[in-house]
Amino acid sequence: MTLILDNAFTIDSYNRRSDRLSLLRANLGTYAPELGITEETLSWSATADSNWSGARVSAGVEKGERDVAFETYQNKLNETRSLVIDIKEVLLALIEDTEKGDEIIDEYGIGGQTPRNRGGLKQFIDQIAETSNRLRAAGDSRVLPEALINKIVEAGNEIVNLWHLAQKEKQESANAYDVLEEIYNEDSQKLRLIYQMAKLIWGSSSPNLILLGFAPSTPRHGGGQPDAPQGFNKEWNEPELTLFWNDATNVSSYQLVYSEGNDEWEELYSGNLASFTYNPPTGKRNYKVRARNARGFSEWSGVLEFERPVGVE
């Protein structure tokens, strides 16, 4: 589960929002009487997690369908353009070095580059088909077999249809994310209300806030919390990384977290030892540590960066 380090509800990542709502659903009922939580709010918290998850899944499915639709369209567009290029070569072979060949090439419109965009390619196909049908009706032999003409016309129609389908999927995806954003904003308001009530009853630095998906604050002066761990450092003895810091008094435990280059921090270790050793994955990770006692958490230490070499397992 993502470690919740702040109460910036309106800028939660989607994963962090899921974690908040999951903790709230699991624990709010226990503290509702103490915090004066209304039945309406308690009822919301019981289903907010599943409603949010359902909306995320729906938005993800719609996005997936949109992506597939655009990929299908693009593949068909490329395939059709390749077909048209081949047909154009056949036509040029039929027309070149014949009487008024240059005029016929102009009628077909095949003297220049084959368009890459959907509209231009469809227009190009229609001109080839119309010219071929007109010349065939006039008895001119410099035309393609009807089967080939039908093939490129069908391909041209298909890219248009696939484009409209992709646009439809794009709109449905946008609608799903609008719903998701609406739920996100409504939940943000309720989370802030519960947080304010919990903060008034327990205080802003109470560790109990963690159980409801909130981050306790750390007073900078007084309050009895421990100081931030000092001497935070690392030692690499392949294949193990040891992270260590100075042991301190007035501390009951330490919390070590990591991040893979974004704002999502995950707990790696929690305990009373002032070091932790493990076999890290390949790639870069950032680490920081804080101390805890009965009065709350310390500030975080500075951030350490370590990148395990590629190929070292």
Image (tube, helix red, strand yellow):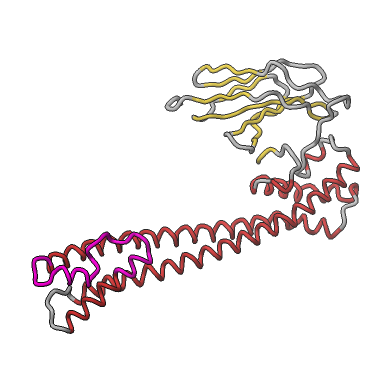
Q: Nearer the viewer, residue 263 or 235?
A: 263
Q: Residue at x 82, y 46 (%)?
A: 195
Image spot of residue 213 (x, y percent): 75, 44
Q: Does residue 236 appear to the left or right of 297 in the view shown?
A: left
Q: Nearer the viewer, residue 66 or 231?
A: 66
The quarter of the displayed image where residue 295 is located: top right
The quarter of the displayed image where residue 96 is located: bottom left
Q: Does residue 164 appear to the left or right of 214 in the view shown?
A: left
Q: Residue at x 53, y 21 (%)?
A: 240
Image spot of residue 197 (x, y percent): 87, 47
State whether residue 32 is above or below residue 115: above
Q: Nearer the viewer, residue 30 or 187?
A: 187
Please state, as top left, top right, bottom left or bottom right, where the N terminus lies in the image. Answer: top right
State whether residue 195 is above or below residue 40: above
Image spot of residue 280 (x, y percent): 54, 27
Q: Residue at x 88, y 24 (%)?
A: 222
Q: Does residue 196 appear to the left or right of 138 in the view shown?
A: right
State whether residue 241 is above or below residue 11: above
Residues in magenta? 96-124
| Residue 105 painted magenta | yes
The quarter of the displayed image where residue 123 is located: bottom left
Q: How many marks?
A: 0
| Residue 183 painted magenta | no
Q: Nearer the viewer, residue 145 or 35?
A: 145
Q: Residue at x 51, y 65 (%)?
A: 169
Q: Does residue 259 appear to the left or right of 33 in the view shown?
A: left
State whether residue 16 is above or below residue 49: above
Image spot of residue 181 (x, y percent): 67, 57
